[in-house]
Amino acid sequence: MGKKIRVLIVDDSAVVRQTLTDTLQSDPQIEVMGAARDPYVAADFIAKEVPDVIVLDVEMPRMDGITFLQKIMSQHPIPVVMCSTLTEKGAETTLKALEYGAIDIIQKPKLGTKQFIEESKIRICDSVKAAARVMVKRIAAKPHRVEKKLTADVMLAPPQPKAMVQTTEQVVAVGASTGGTEALRIFLEALPGDCSGIVIVQHMPEGFTRAFAERLNGLCRIRVKEAQDGDTVLRGQALIAPGNRHMMLKRSGARYFVEIKDGPLVCRHRPSVDVLFRSTARYAGKNAIGIIMTGMGDDGSRGMAEMHQAGAYTIAQDEDSCVVFGMPKEAIALGGVEKILPLEKIASVIGGK
């Protein structure tokens, strides 16, 4: 095994510092080099040794996480993962941190069932490993995985070729992870107000997707909202899967709608891009466009191959414009991608299809 990812934790809560330390050090690829109660103590750590990744609390008494993040990014850029509570204010502030250069968001660890704790461990460790990859994204080092990784089979059966009720209405299915919040903003801002209906999975913790959708809704010509069970897919609207829930495309006659469901992690995620893409292959077939964007891992690669086989037009974001060229790379390797494009050109293709 290669060099471990060295992590510095910055949080004013001793309990959170210890919980995060135990969680991260349970992964053989990660080593916690220190845990600081505030940014001033953290600065002393960094002066002695620069960490590979910083896990940073949003709200701290002596200096808030956003101010410290800005100092880090202006003086000595280091991949930062923001650790936030589920409060409305916390969600809005954390989204602001992504604009300032933070790589990802994790939810503060809390007590729960054994399954919840295990899932939180997977998400937190994967976020840190994804952040570390941002610095070395040109190195094709595959992450070590020990947990059993479930496929979309646990949510719905593979699509079967069959006759569908004829419709010409187009659906665009999009999947993204690390770096996806800004990629989606660029993509959605470029779309006209009457574009085809869009369904999106962005890997993001529960409680943050609503604030993310509201932020995008204020920036884009189209309407953007966090999806609710039964929402109709409409022209000029994007539905974003709620954090911690799977989203599937369904169809009744010529009407497309979404189903929001609980279920196990699929490809280590909930919501999962594979689940969305498989359902899109099944219910939209050749009437769909699939887009896979920046992110670590391979979630979406199998689903995109299924969309391609069902006749959908499939697009992957190119390596140069990705924060982490993981998910697009895996989708390309499986042969499910028809077109590889820079981020800024994807919206124009959608408009032209």
Image: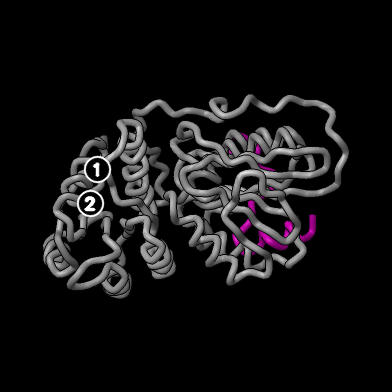
109 w.r.t. 73: above or below: above
x and y, in percent, of residue 317 in the image: 59, 53
How many C-alpha atoms fall within 10 Å of the one at disc 2: few (<14), some, or many (≥20)?
A: many
Residue furthest to the right: 166
Q: What residue is drawn where x is 52% and y is 29%?
A: 151
* Residue in the image at 17% along x and 72% along y: 62
| Rendered residue at 16%/47% (across/down) | 18
- Dot label at residue 7: 2
Residue 83 included in the magenta stretch of the image: no
Q: Is residue 277 visible?
A: yes
| Disc 2 versus disc 1: nearer the observer | 1
Amino acid under disc 2 = Val
In reply to whether residue 335 is colored magenta, the answer given is yes
Residue 181 is left or right of residue 75, and the answer is right
Q: What residue type is labelled 1?
A: Leu
User: What residue is pinned by disc 1?
Assistant: 24
Q: Give the range drawn in magenta.
A: 332-353
Residue 149 image offset from top left, x and y in percent: 44, 29
Provide residue 7's location: percent of width, then percent of height.
22, 51
Q: What element carries label 1?
A: helix
Q: Is residue 3 visible?
A: no
